[in-house]
Amino acid sequence: MSSGATEFEALLRQALTPVEPPEGLASRMESALVSLAELAQEELESWELSAMRDPRNWIRPAAAALVGAGAGTALVVLRVRSRHRARRQQASGLLDLAGKTIHDIAHEARRVLPER
């Protein structure tokens, strides 16, 4: 029975071995998220306030707001995560790393949010 457990553990280790993502995956995801955020912003800008009086017209702008917020958040996370390894090497400690990460999140959020 222990040989079966050993085989199972070996199979489990093999199945859970980290896999590096394809080289262009991050750039493709970033461009797709940017496109989604821009499309959602255009959709919201095209709606007139007078059309919002009827609750039946709320679905499209609500969906556009959700898609835009989700894409923007994912874009910030993707960009911050891509620079995490470099920040971790530059940081002098855990508190310094947290501060640099928060600063990077704020910087990316300002880049993603439309200027008003």
Image: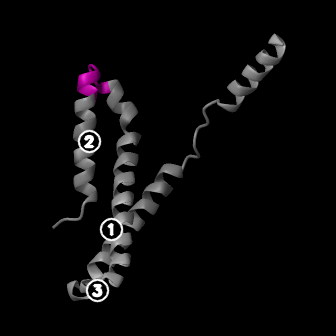
Q: Amino acid at mark 3?
A: Asp
Camera-side mark, 3 or 1: 3
| Residue at figure coordinates x 41%, y 66% from the top left | 36
Q: Quadrant of residue 55?
A: bottom left
Which residue ends up furthest to the bottom in the rendered image? Answer: 50
| Left or right: where 18 falls relative to 114 | right
In this view, the residue in front, 76 or 28, is 76
| Residue at figure coordinates x 39%, y 40% from the top left | 81
Q: Position of residue 38 (x, y in %)?
A: 35, 69
Please identify the quadrant where the C terminus is shown.
bottom left
Image: 80 above or below 115: above
Which residue ends up furthest to the top in the rendered image? Answer: 2
Q: Amino acid at mark 2?
A: Asp
Circles 3, 2 touching at the beta carbon (< 8 Å): no
Say which label, 1 or 2, has the lower sequence index: 1
Q: Which mark is residue 54?
A: 3
What predominant SS class does the magenta segment belong to? helix
| Left or right: where 67 falls relative to 97 | right
**SS category of the residue bearing label 2:** helix
Q: Amino acid at mark 1?
A: Ala
**SS category of the residue bearing label 1:** helix
In this view, the residue in front, 57 or 104, is 57
Q: Which residue is mark 1?
A: 65
**SS category of the residue bearing label 3:** loop
Residue 65 in the magenta stretch? The answer is no
Write down the region rendered in magenta: 90-97
